[in-house]
């Protein structure tokens, strides 16, 4: 009997998304299930135990945490989206129905997904979704979306977008900001390095971003973009109607230098500092085998 390791965020699922319901669904689909809490010690070692696949059940924070621990491991990762925005799942066309996702596991397809190596001082870590500096990171810190599923996720996302709109409307440009040597100091309210199309509360900031193209997509807002961005966020317009931001290129690596602004690596946030901060980013191509719908 094939074995699934279920990495489950205990605060994410309720009702039909509760752990015992998901375990029962997987068992009925013909799997032996090894269930792990994403909050338990020794999770990294447990995820390396032999299994047909790993299933991450939770929101983007849970999925990214499991993805980082599977970096470079051949075991496929499937996603059961139980969060609010579910950006990672949506980027691959996964719906919100847990039963449909489980049914797809019987004949899985997969894609090799890029990850981001982030070097901060002497520390190296891995990001999955994006790295940001400035107003969007500051707004996301203040309104950090919960990894717990909401009763009304669309309303929660709309409220988060409106919170970002308020932050962006008042934000001053990042006082010191250089991206790959280009000086944007005092000219850009935010900069984002994207590994996939969606970030935050379902924001599609770059239509061209893809998880398997070996590139980071660098975008920034300039003063000319502020009004249209604020209106788009505030009014809840569809993702495909996002204002076009300035592209700083599609790159394999990037070096960011800044001060006086909030920064973010996926869902980890760092408060502003007057001292210069530096990050080096590099794409790690095809580091994760992600299960996607076969149809």
Image (cartoon, helix red, strand yellow):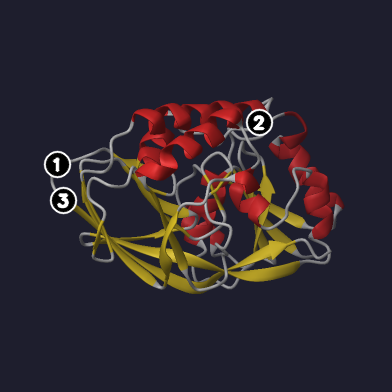
In space, the residues marked 3 and 1 are separated at their CA atoms by 6 Å
- The answer to whether residue 128 of the structure is visible from this angle is yes
What residue is rendered at 75% in x and 47% in y?
Answer: 95
Marks 1, 2: nearer the viewer: 1
Query: Is disc 2 surrounded by few (<14), some (14 to 19) or many (20+) residues within 10 Å?
Result: some
As drawn, the label of residue 236 is none
Q: Give residue 104's quadrant in the image.
A: bottom right
Residue 238: percent from left, percent from top: 66, 40
Q: In this view, does 211 lie above or below 214?
A: above
Q: In which quarter of the image is the C terminus?
A: bottom right
Q: Residues at badges 1 and 2 in contact (C-beta under 8 Å)?
A: no
Q: In the drawing, does residue 205 fall left or right of residue 84?
A: left
- Taking depth in this image into account, of 282 and 8 the one nearest to the observer is 282
Q: Earlier in the sequence, mark 3 or mark 2?
A: 2
Query: Is disc 1 surrounded by few (<14), some (14 to 19) or many (20+) residues within 10 Å?
Result: few
Q: Mark 1 points at which residue?
A: 274
Q: Name the residue under label 2.
A: 153
In space, the residues marked 3 and 2 are separated at their CA atoms by 37 Å
Q: Is residue 15 above or below residue 110?
A: above
Q: In the drawing, does residue 159 fall left or right of residue 254?
A: right
In space, the residues marked 1 and 2 are separated at their CA atoms by 37 Å
Under circle 2, the secondary element is helix
Q: Which of marks 1 and 2 is nearer the N terminus?
A: 2
Residue 105: percent from left, percent from top: 79, 60
Q: In the drawing, does residue 134 fall left or right of residue 185?
A: right
């Amino acid at each position: 009997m094939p074995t699934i390791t279920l990495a489950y965020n205990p605060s994410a699922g309720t009702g039909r998304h509760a752990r015992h319901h998901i375990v029962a669904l997987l068992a009925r689909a013909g799997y032996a299930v090894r269930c792990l809490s994403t909050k338990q010690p020794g999770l990294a070692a447990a995820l390396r135990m032999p299994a047909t696949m790993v299933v991450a059940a939770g929101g983007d924070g849970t999925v990214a945490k499991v993805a980082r621990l599977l970096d470079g491991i051949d075991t496929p990762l499937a996603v059961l989206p139980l969060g609010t925005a579910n950006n990672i799942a949506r980027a691959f066309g996964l719906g919100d129905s847990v039963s449909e996702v489980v049914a797809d596991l019987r004949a899985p397809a997969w894609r090799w997904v890029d990850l981001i190596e982030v070097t901060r001082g002497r520390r190296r870590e891995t990001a999955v979704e994006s790295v940001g500096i400035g107003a969007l990171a500051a707004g996301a810190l203040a309104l950090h979306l919960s990894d717990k599923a909401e009763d009304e996720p669309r309303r929660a996302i709309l409220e988060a977008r409106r919170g970002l709109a308020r932050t962006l409307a008042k934000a001053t440009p990042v006082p010191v900001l250089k991206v790959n040597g280009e000086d944007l100091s005092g000219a850009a309210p935010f900069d984002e390095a994207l590994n996939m199309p969606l970030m935050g509360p379902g924001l599609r900031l770059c239509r061209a971003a893809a998880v398997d193209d070996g590139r980071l997509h660098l975008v920034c807002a300039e003063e000319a973009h502020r009004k249209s961005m604020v209106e788009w966020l505030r009014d809840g317009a569809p993702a495909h109607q996002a204002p076009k931001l300035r592209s700083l290129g599609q790159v394999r690596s990037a070096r960011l230098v800044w001060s006086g602004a909030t920064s973010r690596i996926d869902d980890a946030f760092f408060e502003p500092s007057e001292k210069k901060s530096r990050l080096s980013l590099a794409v790690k191509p095809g580091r994760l085998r992600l299960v996607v719908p076969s149809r």
